[in-house]
Amino acid sequence: MAKPVFLIGYMGSGKSTMGKKLARILNYAFEDTDALIEKMTGKTIDEIFGSEGEAAFRMLEHSVIKSLTNRINTVVATGGGAPCYYDNLDLMQQQGITVYLKLHPESIVKRLKQSKTRRPLLKYTDDDSLLPYVMRHLAQREEFYEKARIIFKGENADPEELARLIKTYRQ
């Protein structure tokens, strides 16, 4: 029985996509904190941000992360800001293995432009100001992301390779 694996990184870095693939390879369960929050509240993340604000969302996110820390054999895709609030990063580090899916800002912007998911923090950001926004915002969050136990290059990421790294880390 193994501790949970928490995928952290900026929005659009592929945490949910990689998480599902990784869970299949490791034969683990998969959870997505945003999906759990939406299921729990009956609202989209965008609606929660709009009606209750970011602070309320961050409290919900914290309680979901806390509830997932005692899971075994589970890969958890977290929201981009999750490690930056409350003691979420410490909780994830103490109870599991954290993996930072690290991408260059240009790669993130390309993915965000292609994404069909609405991102509350980008609601008022147009395409021209997206790269400067991501660079600035990523710089603020990187101090948290860089504390992950495993830092994994997100461009053309191979889930098999990440699974091997996680298994090696566990030994």
Image (cartoon, rainbow, N blue to C red):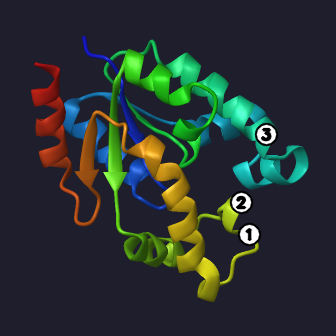
Q: Residues within 10 Å of mark 2 (few under 14, many from 20)?
A: some
Residue furthest to the bottom in view is: 128
Is residue 84 visible in the rendered image? The answer is: yes
Rendered image: mark on residue 55: 3
Answer yes or no: do the residues labelled 3 and 1 have beta carbons within 8 Å? no
Residue 102: where, in percent of width, then height? 33, 56
Label 3 or label 2, whichever comes before in sequence order: 3
State the residue in front, 50 or 89: 89
On the picture, is 8 further left or further right than 152? right
From mark 1 to mark 2, how far is it between C-alphas?
Answer: 5 Å
Rendered image: mark on residue 166: none
On the picture, is 148 further left or further right than 150? right
Rendered image: mark on residue 120: 2
Residue 105 occupies quadrant: bottom left
Q: Tell me what residue is drawn at x 35 percent, y 68 percent.
A: 104
Q: Residues within 10 Å of mark 1 (few under 14, many from 20)?
A: few
Q: Secondary structure at mark 3?
A: helix
Is residue 11 visible in the rendered image? The answer is: no
Residue 137 occupies quadrant: bottom right
Identify the residue under disc 1.
Answer: 123
From mark 3 to mark 2, how far is it between C-alphas?
Answer: 13 Å
Which quarter of the figure is the N terminus placed in?
top left
Q: Is residue 154 above or below residue 51?
A: below
Label 3 or label 1, whichever comes before in sequence order: 3
The amino acid type of the residue labelled 2 equals Pro
